[in-house]
Image: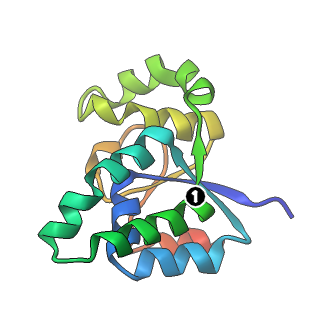
Amino acid sequence: MERRLLALDANILVRGVFGSNVLRLLEEYEETIAFCTADVCFHETRRNIQAVAERRRFDVRKSEVILEQLAEIVALVDPKFYQPHEGESRRRIAFRDVKDWPLLATALFLNCPIWTEDQDFFGCGVATWTTNNIEVFLKGA
């Protein structure tokens, strides 16, 4: 059976580092779902992790270790694959936050939904899931 695809926004990666639910879901469903993200989402998370950890009074080293665990589950999509969809992505998300185009382009390239807490993706023509209801998708309903 081929695994279904799901693109993760940077805010989901942050939740994966600092919460328990996202990492638990990724580990539980990694055999049936291929999790991925645009490389820039992962790099954005890595850049911001120290500041977030300090703000939340969370051990910075532990947050880096958890991010590495996420990197073993979530595949990074290289720009050479999603960049051909840049123009279409920018058009679709221009009404919200155009800097999110790489993740939308990744979802268009892979023809998959996006897991996000960011309303900027709503109405862009790609299915979006939030953490509150992601298990509906993960369970295959």
User: In the displayed image of the protein, which residue is found farthest to the right?
Assistant: 1
Tell me where residue 54 sits by quadrant: bottom left
- How crowded pointer 1 is (Cα within 10 Å; few <14, some 14-19, many 20+) is rated as many
Which structural element holds mark 1? loop
The structure residue drawn at horizontal position 35% and vertical position 71%, both measured from the top left corner, is 61
Of residue 139 and residue 46, the one placed in the foreground of this image is 46
* Percent x, y of residue 42: 44, 49
Question: Where 133 sits versus 36, above or below?
Answer: below
* Percent x, y of residue 63: 35, 70
Question: Where 9 sits versus 66, above or below?
Answer: above
29 with respect to 101 (left or right) = right
Q: Which residue is mark 1?
A: 74
The structure residue drawn at horizontal position 34% and vertical position 63%, both measured from the top left corner, is 14
* Percent x, y of residue 102: 44, 33
Of residue 101 and residue 113, the one placed in the foreground of this image is 101
Quadrant into which the C terminus falls: bottom right
Tell me where residue 53 sits by quadrant: bottom left
Query: In the rendered picture of this protein, how many numbered marks are placed on residues?
Result: 1
55 with respect to 32 (left or right) = left
User: In the displayed image of the protein, which residue is found farthest to the front?
Assistant: 61
Quadrant into which the N terminus falls: bottom right
The reply to whether residue 93 is visible in this rendering is yes
The structure residue drawn at horizontal position 24% and vertical position 29%, both measured from the top left corner, is 95
Tell me where residue 109 sits by quadrant: top right
The structure residue drawn at horizontal position 43% and vertical position 73%, both measured from the top left corner, is 133
Residue type at tag 1: Val
The reply to whether residue 122 is visible in this rendering is no
User: In the displayed image of the protein, which residue is found farthest to the left?
Assistant: 55
Which colour scheme appears in the figure? rainbow
Of residue 43 and residue 138, the one placed in the foreground of this image is 43
